[in-house]
Amino acid sequence: MKNTTPEAFDAPVDVQDAPMDKEEILMKESDILAGILSLGREKDEEAAYRKIQIRRGGVLKLEFRVRPITEEENQTCWRQATRYAPYKIGQPKVAVETNSARYRSYVLYTATVDADRAKVWDNRQAKDAFNILDSIEMIDRILLAGEKSHILDIIDEISGFGEEAEELAKNS
């Protein structure tokens, strides 16, 4: 229960709650702007990339890099893996089924750094060798389920879905 006695209103005021002068406000605004710009560029910086190595039998078979993905990219992957009911005039699109394995492959494809994507998933010679037309099929053909799951865990972590994000939400 909240203390509403007159003594409670005479408590000392915390210095942090004191009003800031104009210079302090401008300083805080520049810090905020710097933080926003830094966060907005972070996903495209090499420091945010993670190197993925696929080893089988102790032998390195494949190496590529992944980057964080945005919420919009995640939604696009979801839409691409979803089958919709036939469109009826005046009716909204209705999702019938989402293929979760295909969704996960789209996320992995999207998160792969462009230069590596071209060499690995979009590799024309490899597609011809496996008689594959689609880059998403290439992911499913090459990676084992556990490997794919591990890579997706890494993508989730660097995209803000890791334990740090959970801790941040708990502390809010």
Image: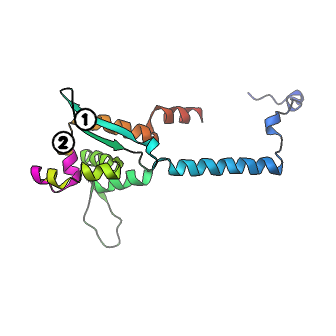
Task: Name the residue rendered at 32%, 37% in the picture.
Answer: 52
Mark toward the start of the polypeptide (1 vs 2): 1
The colour scheme is rainbow
Residue 166 horizontal/vertical position (percent): 49, 34
Q: Nearer the viewer, mark 1 or mark 2?
A: 1
Cβ atoms at labels 1 and 2 below 8 Å apart: yes
What range is drawn magenta here? 128-139
Side (left or right) of 144 relative to 110? left
- Which numbered tag is attached to residue 142? 2
Q: Nearer the viewer, residue 32 or 168?
A: 32
**Circle 1 residue:** 54
Amino acid type of disc 2?
Answer: Ile
Task: Name the residue rendered at 87%, 32% in the picture.
Answer: 9
Circle 2 crowding by C-alpha within 10 Å: few under 14, some 14–19, many from 20: some
Side (left or right) of 60 relative to 6? left
To which quarter of the image does residue 20 belong? top right
Task: Name the residue rendered at 17%, 55% in the picture.
Answer: 124
Question: What SS does tag 2 mark?
Answer: helix
Residue 133 horizontal/vertical position (percent): 16, 57
Q: Nearer the viewer, residue 53 or 135?
A: 53
Main SS of residues in magenta = helix
Side (left or right) of 72 relative to 14? left
Q: Residue furthest bottom?
A: 89
Q: Is residue 132 magenta?
A: yes
